[in-house]
Amino acid sequence: AQTVTQSQPEMSVQEAETVTLSCTYDTSESDYYLFWYKQPPSRQMILVIRQEAYKQQNATENRFSVNFQKAAKSFSLKISDSQLGDAAMYFCAYRSPGGGSARQLTFGSGTQLTVLP
Amino acid sequence: SQTIHQWPATLVQPVGSPLSLECTVEGTSNPNLYWYRQAAGRGLQLLFYSVGIGQISSEVPQNLSASRPQDRQFILSSKKLLLSDSGFYLCAWSVRSNQPQHFGDGTRLSIL
């Protein structure tokens, strides 16, 4: 079974600065998908960024980028030019390819990000 | 565009009472549907998922059940709620491909 570990329960960053959230995972599969979700105080779950394991290029979405290290099974999220609206709980998630129960997401325990004005 | 609706937003129920949470998806056909529970300060735990009408898979044994009476409708139920059922419940959907899951706004359930 796959596991996802977020070792930073809480992080803080100054507005306009850059912060990196860590995520590691354990899997025996070679092909899979990784995601970062954001959960603001409104409790919605919002997809931030995704990465396919077969792609060597790190995914980027505006101010959000990832550092995907497949050999190290690491998938960190970098937020550049942090904004107050970035304050939220961030979850790293893993999903296997294929059907059946493989469609489910395995979530980490989350990192609470505080953005300081 | 696709949208997901989940209601109610908050619910307070006494122990032993029944439960019905509803989730509907619009703008897509035959989606995969999911129910998650999030305990306070913790990550999400998958409760049920469905790949089609009447097809329900349960991930953890519990006091809850799920049903999918229509293609885009997913219902979470309980005959008798327990205190441990309190939490934040999220419904999600995804297309039948390697696409991410999209979540509803969630239901905060408090059991008294």
Image (cartoon, coloured by chain):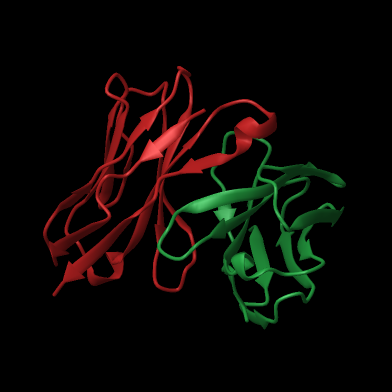
Chain green in the figure, letter? B
Q: Is residue B72 in view from this perspective?
A: no
Marks counted in the figure total 0
Return the x and y of residue A105 as percentages of the image width and height: 54, 41
User: Quick check: A67 above or below A90?
Assistant: above
Return the x and y of residue A71 as percentages of the image width and height: 29, 19
> Measuring 47% from the left and 68% from the top, which residue is drawn there?
A43
The answer to whether residue B23 is left or right of residue B110 is right
* Residue A77 position by quadrant: top left
> Measuring 14% from the left and 54% from the top, which residue is drawn there?
A18
User: Quick check: A72 above or below A19?
Assistant: above
The answer to whether residue B10 is left or right of residue A60 is right
User: Quick check: B35 above or below A98?
Assistant: below
Residue sitting nearer the eye, A49 or A95:
A95
Q: Is residue A86 in view from this perspective?
A: yes
Return the x and y of residue B2 as percentages of the image width and height: 65, 57
Chain red in the figure, letter? A
> Measuring 77% from the left and 48% from the top, which residue is drawn there?
B29
Q: Quadrant of the C terminus of chain A?
A: bottom left
The answer to whether residue B90 is left or right of residue B29 is left
